[in-house]
Structures are given as C-alpha cells and as structure tokens.
Image: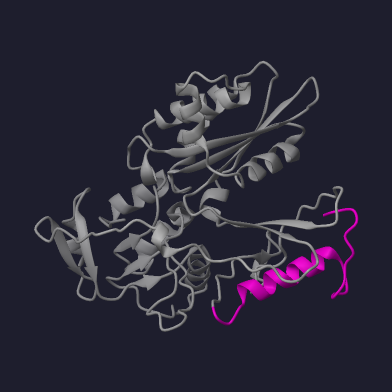
Amino acid sequence: VGMDVRWGGFTGSLDDAINEGVRRGYNHPDNTLRASVVADPQFDRKNTKDNTPAVIFTEIVPGDTLEVTVAAKGGGSENKSKLVMLNPGDSVVDWVLKTVPTMGAGWCPPGMLGIGIGGTAEKAALMAKESLMDDLDMHELQARKASGAELSKVEALRIELYEKVNALGIGAQGLGGLSTVLDIKIKMYPTHAASKPVAMIPNCAATRHAHFVMDGSGAVYLDPPSLDLWPDVNWTPDYNKSKKVNLDTLTPAEVASWKPGDTLLLNGKMLTGRDAAHKRISDMLAKGEKLPVDFTNRVIYYVGPVDPMKGEAVGPAGPTTATRMDGFTEMMLAETGLIAMIGKAERGPVAIEAIKKHQSAY
C-alpha cells in the first residue's frame, strides 16, 4: 500500500473491503467457486459460505498505488507445510531432503517448494509463502550455470535443492519419476544469532495466484489465459489392457479380484464425500441413526463437487487428500457396506490395514 494512497467508496477497514471483494469473487453468479473456509477451527467448524475472512498481510511503502497479490490455495499442499527451528550450524539441505519424503503425495507433485530462512518462526513461514508467488525460472538459472555464469549463494542453493529433491525419485503424484519439483524458491531475512528458523511450503501444479496494481483510475481488468497455451492432449484408454467396471452392479468379489496396477474404466454412479461427511456418518452411527443413503456395495469418491455452471454436467470435482479419511476407513468398511474408495495420494497404515482386512480397494 502506497503511503500516499487515498481511499474512497467504502466504509470500514481495508480488511473489510478486501473481504467484500473475496465474498463477491467466490459467489459471482457466472462462476461460483467452492466455499472452503470454516469459522471456529477447533469446535463447530461451520462453513462461512464465501471463503471469508481472507488471510491478509499488508505492507506500507512509498508511493501512491496499491499492489495486490491474490492467492487461492487448497489444503492438499498447504497441509504439508513444515516448520523447524534449526541450530545455526545445521544443514538446510539435509533437513529438506529428510522432510520431503515424509510429505507423501498429497501436495500433488510436481510442484514448487517455497523455503523461508531466518527471521522468526512466523516470518520464515510468511517468506516461504511469498516466494511461491514468484515466476518459475529454474530453467533460466540452470542455463546460466551451464554457461559458466557466476551464481549467487542463494541461486546455487536453489539449484542444489532442485537437483537433489528430484533425485529422490518421488515423481508426479508420488508414483515415481524424475520430476518432483519444477522450481525451488528461497527467501531469507536476518535472524537472532542463536536461531535458524526454516519453513517449507509446497505448491501443487495448480498454482492459483494473480497480481495487479490499482492507481485510482478505475477497475483493473485481467485477460484470461489463452487456451492456445495449453498443450494438445490426445488420450484414449487401452481397452485391451483395462477392466470395465459397472459401479451399479459391483460386488465384493469383483473388487477382491483387482490387482495393484490395474487400469479400471469406471461407469455408473458413485457416492461423494469428504472428511466432514465422514465425521457426520460416524456421529450418526454412534447415535444409532439411519444413514441418508445406502452404502451397500457402493464406491465413494473423496470429493465435494462444486455446483455446475453454464450447462456443465458437473462442476469441478478434483479429489481431496485421502489420508484425512484414514481414521474413518475401518468404520466405513465394517459398518456401512462400502466396498471401495477413490481419492488422491497415499493411504496411511491404519487405512491400509482396514482395506486388507475387508478385502476392499482404494
């Protein structure tokens, strides 16, 4: 925020104005977006219906313009954020290489890692998040290194981490491969002589952020990215190597016949539900209440679809991180008749044991 900016057109605080913009953006009638924010994070966790309040950081600088960075991020990668208070002599590289494998695949690699070093705990975390707003330039950095150009210490550290993280072999969606990160970003700040706080925040490939400047002359209009920027993708299933599955007539015996690595072509109806739905099911079963739907021989997809818009058959329905349902898996398989689950990334030991026990599938 420029020190010479003069405000008009709204009452209340700057945060109030920002939250009103968020409210209008997410509830725009032409393109309603998912409402994901819950108030009272510890107890009721009631959805605010419009993704407010936003998490807002404001800095006062010289000038008479307003520069805004907006970032919309889901929980899949955000929930894998890490913070550590290292000793001054500890290796950041060693910590990163030890930590990344523990993050699983729920952050949807390949993506970016933002690293904040220094300041205090909260400053390191903020720097890590801010670094993810920068352009991807690792390919340019590598070209400079190959040309023999001198690199700064931070640039050299970025390349070292990029190469060593990719050498871990985690790969896209954790399925193994050479591309786990597309870039490594690092921001630093002076810190106490006794400290070295380090935060690491991943961003998935769906890195949703926008940047604009307001000078008081009117609204800012941003052109949407051209569809020509997307590569042509031509894919059809290999029917000879795939199994056709009718979800409406699926049986436990058919599920038990599936093997790891099978490609399944699904047709029919599936149920959908995320962690909040599973918690409600758990509470209803504990009270002896009848469930709203029959789960017998059904498959559930870990997703909360957004309402369709403009003639869409279904709104966005990307899978949510499956590990959040791990604690409910035994209950769902043992008490509801559910026989299979669809989701994103790995399952933990508790869920894997339940799947084995009930000869289910994920």
Q: Quadrant of residue 220?
A: bottom right
Residue 15 sits above or below residue 153 on the image: below
Q: Assign the C terminus to one quadrant of the image.
A: bottom left
Q: As displayed, is residue 62 above or below residue 253?
A: above
Camera-side residue of 67 and 199: 67
Q: Is residue 97 visible?
A: no
Q: Give x and y (percent) for residue 64.
A: 85, 56
- Which residue: 44% across, 27% down? 163
Q: Residue at x 58, y 82 (%)?
A: 29
Q: Residue placed at 63% from the left, 41% from the top?
A: 131
Left/right placement of residue 186 relative to residue 254 reads: right
**Quick check: 311 left or right of 219?**
left
- Towards the viewer: 73 or 142: 142
Measured as percent of width and height from the top left, residue 82 is found at 60, 38
What span is in magenta? Answer: 1-30
Q: Quadrant of residue 92?
A: top right
Q: Is residue 277 magenta?
A: no
Image height of 159 relative to 281, above or below: above
Could you tell me which quadrant the N terminus lies in? bottom right
Find out whether residue 20 is within the magenta segment.
Answer: yes
Residue shown at the point (18%, 55%) measured from the top left: 258
In this figure, which colouring scheme has been used for the structure? Answer: one colour
Tell me where residue 217 appears, x and y as whole percent: 78, 69
Is residue 237 toward the left or the right of residue 36 in the image?
Answer: left
Front position in the image: 274 or 18? 18
Q: Is residue 53 visible?
A: yes
Residue 150 in the image, given as x and y percentages of width and height: 57, 19
Q: Count up the numbered dots.
A: 0
Up the image or down, 158 lies above or below 360; here it is: above
Q: Residue furthest left?
A: 240
